[in-house]
Amino acid sequence: MKKLLTSLSLLALFSQSTLPIAAQAGADLFNNTNTSESADSNVEPESSSSESSETEESEESEETSETNESETITSSEEEISTEESSESETSDSQDEETPTDEKTDFIPADLLTLFEENRQDNTKLDIAWEDYQQVADYTFYDLTVMDPTGVTTYQEVLENFATSEEVVVTDEYYEGELSVINFLYQAEEGDFHPERGIEDWAQIEFYFAGDLLIYSGVSTMSFEFADHNKTDIQDIDTLSQATDEVSELATLEPFEINGIGQVLADGEFHHGLAFPVTPMTEDEAFGSVAVLDVVDDTILSSYTAGSQDIMTYSYTTVTFIGLTNIVPNNLVTL
């Protein structure tokens, strides 16, 4: 398992507070600030048309003329009916073939199921997760392609992201550097979770390269490291080295997901899945945190952070740091 090396200079980007995390001004994020624009190409569906057949009329005797005309009219009406049916089927076929603006699922099905069935028992995390589904409508800045066309902006998220209850919003904007918007979900003071004995808190965070969305994440802010929720770190080592399917994580016991986030790199979403694990060193008295890099439904890589890092800076922060140090990207290594 790859150890997440978190330097003091990196962690200084974020405030050391239990309140929402705010980004601080720092060095330029990019090795190359030039971006290229690519033109979109739209493929129009091919259209089809039906040809009508000609009706042949034969001349008969006067006694059979009216009968033939009646038969001709009936035949012609049947052909017209057949044409209309054919045109209707063609129209339906064209409607099915017409490209639509369908959204690509931003979280793969197996990972989505895994998170929903194994996330921390936390009423505020449940609410934040429902609000988080709006991210499916957002366009991320690809960290390798670096094309800003159509990318969701800082101001769009700040103005349009809707929360289903009153939350604490903290935003810090730094042009050309790392900007952050944080939505903090808090339980009523003194409303303790019956098992953890602490209040249910959760958060949603958005990170931007200046104005462009590069990362989003949702996680608990009610931190707990206990025997009933820490996965054996050796089990995670085994799974990540074998690049197993993410569904294999459902077989682990115990297993409690505390956060998830994603970045877009080289056209693929990389998802960071974070959860508590047993200590990676003797210095970690409470436990550690594993973050898995998942693409589609496959575990590609894993890394760990100390429990103190999580309690100081949050799951979303550490997941962002880890992903941007693992996935191919043109950001300056943080």
Image (cartoon, grey):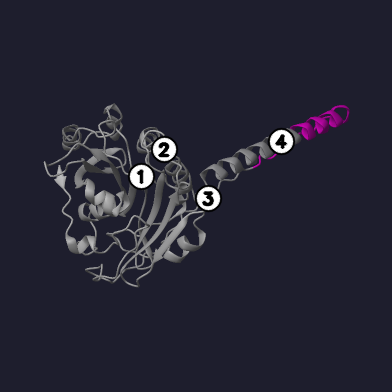
The residue identified by callout 1 is 222
Q: Going 31% across and 29% down the picture, which residue do you hit?
A: 250
333 or 86: nearer the eye? Answer: 333
The residue identified by callout 3 is 165
Of labels 1 and 3, the one closer to you? 1
Q: Earlier in the sequence, mark 1 or mark 4?
A: 4
Of the residues shown, which amino acid type is indicated by label 1? Ser
* Region of the chain picked out in magenta, as a range: 52-76
Describe the element under mark 2 as helix, strand or loop: loop
Splitting the image into 4 quarters, where does residue 153 fall? bottom left
Of labels 2 and 3, the one closer to you? 2
Q: In the displayed orientation, state which residue is furthest to the front.
A: 190
Q: Position of residue 106 (x, y in %)?
A: 39, 46
Q: Are marks 2 and 3 in contact (CB under 8 Å)?
A: no
One can see residue 266 in this view: no
The residue identified by callout 4 is 81
Q: Earlier in the sequence, mark 1 or mark 2?
A: 2
Of the residues shown, which amino acid type is indicated by label 4? Ser
Q: Position of residue 292 (x, y in %)?
A: 25, 42
The image quadrant where one finds the N terminus is top left
> What's the distance in space between the residues labelled 1 and 4, CA to CA?
68 Å
The image quadrant where one finds the C terminus is bottom left
> What's the distance in space between the residues labelled 2 and 4, CA to CA?
68 Å
Q: Are marks 1 and 2 in contact (CB under 8 Å)?
A: yes
Of labels 1 and 4, the one closer to you? 1
Question: Magenta segment: does it hold 9?
Answer: no
Q: Position of residue 15 (x, y in %)?
A: 30, 62
Question: Magenta segment: does it hold 67?
Answer: yes
Whether residue 196 sits left or right of residue 86 in the image: it is left
Of labels 2 and 4, the one closer to you? 2
The residue identified by callout 2 is 193
